[in-house]
Amino acid sequence: MSTVLESSAGGAADPAEAAFVYRDGGLQAEQVPLARIAEAVGTPCYVYAGGAMQATYRALASALGAVGLPTTICYAVKANPHVAVIRGFAALGAGADVVSEGELRRALAAGVPPERIVFAGVGKTEAEMAFALETGILQFNAESIDELKVLDAVAGRLGRTAPVALRVNPDVDARTHAKIATGKAGNKFGIDIDQMPATLALLRDLKNLRLDGLAVHIGSQLVHAEPYEAAFARLAELAREVLAGGWRLRHLDLGGGMGIPYGPARDGRSAALPLDAYVAAVKRTVGSLGLPLVFEPGRYLVGNAGLLLARVLYVKQGRSKRFVILDAAMNDLIRPTLYDAWHEIVPVAEPAPGAALEPVDVVGPICESGDIFAHDRLLPPVAPGDLIAILSTGAYGATMSSTYNSRLPAPEVMVRGGDSAVIKARPDHAAMIAQDRLPAWLEESGRTR
Ligand SMILES: *Cc1c(COP(=O)(O)O)cnc(C)c1O
């Protein structure tokens, strides 16, 4: 028995690492053979280790407990918005971080109490604000002065007071991929820290808003504690100024972004956020303020507890390269294309010890050269019909998928221990085509004059 993802650098052991293990010659999700899942639902499909997700949540909650302050973990729904995933965390006391009415409704459907839901995002509509106000959420993380004015007006119309946290842009380099860095001046997120005095002055006039907190979220897949420390230090300084100005704060929201290992140590891809250093940074910076804390982890809780299961369709020897063509594609998993993301890829049948590795490009069937999961990846020999697992795809996998090339959305399966359940079925082609409506002038005959 061997775990697929080897031990990560620093911090506590990652419970998600034990989620997918070779046993009896085949890769299993917790105690369920992936071959059996592929037989039951077909490929491609997403498989989530529900037990590992919950274990990761517990481990994070316990690590954050060391800060010594009351803490709410608001799971960032956008990482994996399946109601079953949210419910698994809600059952352990989690709140939710949502960025749209759709996500808010999912969190509520999963049983997250409204008073543990924070609503983030730079572009909330009036309708979304109204729905969230009626729901009675914990707070709106406001990202601009105009948003505050609109929220005040909506709250006034509904006769309600909107609880607000100001999301600050601390101008910190998160040292992550440019497309997921959010805390540098010049990113669209948050209110620039030097606009805070003007924002606070405005807040005194907006009678339907109540300032409850300050928030930062500087990016995603952060593997260094230092940018966090810099951002939290600025937040703490700002909080002291705000308190000195006579405001009362109920909590500080430190955002999410905790990075996970995307591969085994031998490839140098194992960099993950050292959680102990992160916790120490929290303590050093905001600890002495004594305010309750909110955290918004998404990827950290689900990323390594999911995989994309696919089948090899063809192995093609080109002039200079060997291509392994899968039945999964960039529409199922866009991260390699969008973020140049590196995902560990392993055969489901356990390779013989010492099996020779050969470099291959692992690609999908879509008519785009960008439809590629891995370049020059060293894999043991694979043949058409073999099952392949693309690891660490529990976050920003299914949720970012599309139906490009009219490919059907991949089904989703959750396991816990020896149990498994199809939590999203593959729709059929007829249902997908039935979503298209013809305008009256094309309905009659299908012919045009
Ligand atoms: C995306 C996002 C998160 C979660 O990010 P992860 O990297 O998945 O932890 C948290 N808070 C806000 C405001 C976000 O936009």
Image: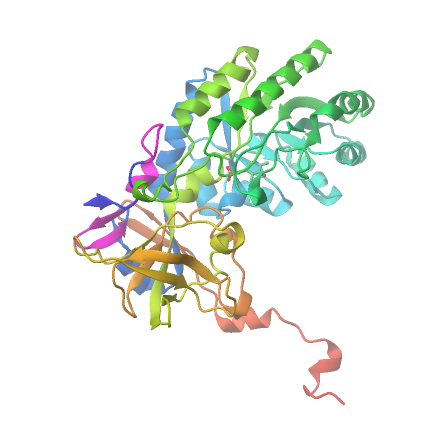
Using the image as rendered, state which of residue 113 and residue 364 is in the foreground: 364
Name of the residue lying farthest toward the right: 205
Residue at image coords 53%, 35%: 175
Report the side of 90 relative to 232 (left or right): left
- Please tell me in which quadrant of the rendered image residue 309 appears: bottom left
Q: Is residue 109 among the parts visible in the rendering?
A: no
Q: Which residues are magenta?
A: 8-28
321 lies above or below 417: below
Q: Is residue 379 among the parts visible in the rendering?
A: yes
Using the image as rendered, state which of residue 84 and residue 24 is in the foreground: 24
Q: Position of residue 125 (x, y in %)?
A: 73, 44
Residue at image coords 39%, 59%: 45
Report the side of 92 relative to 257 (left or right): left
435 lies above or below 390: below
Using the image as rendered, state which of residue 377 and residue 203 is in the foreground: 377
- Please tell me in which quadrant of the rendered image residue 127 appears: top right
Q: Position of residue 265 (x, y in %)?
A: 31, 40
- Please tell me in which quadrant of the rendered image residue 362 appears: bottom left
Indicate whether residue 150 is drawn in magenta.
Answer: no
Classify the position of the C terminus by image quarter: bottom right
